[in-house]
Image: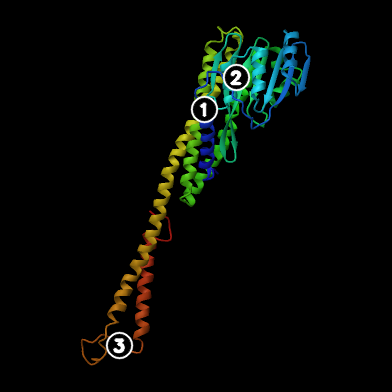
């Protein structure tokens, strides 16, 4: 269930984004900031070819990766950075591989809108990995650089999702081994896009629990939970929509991109279909969350109606009893021989008879209310 204090997490994230953007105000485009990364970066180098060779080194430097790319132009080299690289690393990356300064700035910003940029000798893709963390959706940037025979990926997160790709490469017969660096880039993009499915499924489970709680016992703090769910869906929609546009653009221009093989068109079309499915699923959950407010109001009104019905029944039961006790509470006992004096005042069974009459009235009214379905049953 999404906690009510999610607003504080959202406010902190908004302040972080605001600081990241305002700190670049007035600086030339492509300027890198000298800031300390929150998540230390860990590197991994992988090289493979069609002949079956596979080289994997953890903690490799960019110089080693450049050497491997230069000496093995027929194979595919992949350099993965897990975490947040610092300014020195990004400057070295730009010097050794000619990465555009705007791409380096987007990598460092870590709050980049999903996009696709063509820098002649390189393709740059910035995506977001949605992750369900602390009962909220967190977006992590995943940047990919495609060169002639190499791929550089940078994931701004302590959790590595690229292990799936490495496991596929470790298998002898893998489609990744049979294609070039462009297919590796596609595989990474497909991996990032598919991360949204478990995030949305987890969100759907929490929404189902919230819906059940709203029907059984609506509480005021659930309004904060509903609003937090709306904000989470908005953030996911803001990253899924440009992701779909970037993939669509790549699929349309694949035949004009020298780094992309035209045979990738069917795979990119399938990846685009995944984004469409995600958007449909997200729109479905957005409609469900919007309907939760109506469910909350209906549940509150139904509960108030039940309370008012109970109070009304109690009031109606006491109306005749109040009338009887009020009549017999009048002080006319002095004129006992008067024919107009209240009856039963001098009869020894008068008091029990009055109680019997009152209890009979109550029992009769309860039976009548139950027969009409007004009490002891669902409201009709």
Seen at 23% across and 93% down, the residue is 337
Of callouts 1 and 2, the N-terminal one: 1
Depth check, mark 2 against mark 3: the one in front is 2
Q: Quadrant of the N terminus?
A: top right
- Return the residue nearer the eye: 222 or 10: 10
Q: Mark 2 points at which residue?
A: 104
* Label 1 Cα neighbours within 10 Å, binned few <14 / some 14-19 / many ≥20: few
Of callouts 2 and 3, the N-terminal one: 2
Q: Mark 3 points at which residue?
A: 345
Of callouts 3 and 1, the N-terminal one: 1
15 left or right of 347?
right
182 left or right of 352?
right
Q: Distance between the residues labelled 3 and 1?
A: 90 Å
- Return the residue nearer the eye: 122 or 160: 122
Residue 98, image x, y percentages: 63, 12
Seen at 31% across and 72% down, the residue is 320
Q: Distance between the residues labelled 1 and 2?
A: 15 Å
Q: In this view, does 279 lie above or below 73?
A: below
* Label 2 Cα neighbours within 10 Å, binned few <14 / some 14-19 / many ≥20: many
Q: Name the residue under label 1.
A: 21
- Return the residue nearer the eye: 49 or 340: 49
């Amino acid at each position: 269930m999404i906690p009510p204090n999610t607003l504080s997490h959202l406010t902190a994230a908004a302040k972080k984004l605001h600081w990241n953007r305002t700190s670049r105000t007035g600086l030339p485009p492509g300027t890198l900031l000298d800031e300390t990364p929150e998540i230390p970066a860990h590197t991994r180098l992988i090289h493979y070819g069609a002949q079956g060779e596979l080289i994997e080194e953890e903690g490799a430097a960019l110089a080693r990766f450049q050497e491997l790319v230069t000496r093995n132009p027929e194979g595919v080299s992949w350099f993965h950075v897990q975490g947040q690289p610092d300014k020195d690393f990004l400057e070295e990356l730009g010097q050794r591989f000619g990465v555009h300064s705007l791409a380096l700035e987007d990598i460092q910003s870590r709050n980049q809108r999903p996009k696709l940029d063509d820098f002649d000798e390189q393709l740059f893709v910035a995506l977001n990995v949605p992750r369900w963390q602390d009962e909220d959706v967190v977006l992590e940037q995943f940047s990919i650089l495609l060169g002639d025979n190499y791929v550089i990926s940078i994931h701004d997160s302590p959790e590595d999702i690229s292990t799936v790709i490495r496991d596929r490469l470790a298998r002898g017969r893998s489609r990744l081994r049979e294609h070039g660096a462009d297919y590796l880039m596609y595989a990474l993009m497909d991996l990032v896009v598919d991360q949204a499915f478990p995030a949305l499924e987890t969100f759907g489970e929490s929404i189902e629990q919230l819906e059940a709680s709203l029907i059984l016992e609506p509480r005021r703090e659930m309004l904060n939970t509903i609003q937090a769910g709306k904000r989470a869906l908005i953030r996911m929609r803001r990253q899924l929509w440009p992701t779909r546009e970037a993939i669509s653009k790549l699929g349309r221009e694949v035949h004009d991109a020298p780094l992309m093989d035209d045979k990738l068109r069917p795979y990119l079309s399938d990846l685009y279909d995944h984004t469409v499915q995600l958007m449909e699923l997200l729109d479905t959950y957005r409609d469900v969350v919007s309907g939760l407010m109506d469910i909350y109001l209906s549940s509150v009104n139904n509960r108030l109606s039940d309370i008012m019905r109970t109070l009304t029944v109690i009031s109606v039961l006491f109306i005749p009893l109040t009338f009887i006790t009020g009549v017999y509470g009048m002080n006319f006992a002095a004129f006992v021989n008067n024919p107009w004096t209240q009856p039963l005042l001098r009869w020894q069974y008068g008091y029990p008879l009055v109680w019997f009459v009152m209890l009979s009235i109550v029992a009769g009214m309860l039976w009548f209310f139950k027969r009409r379905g007004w009490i002891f049953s669902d409201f009709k």
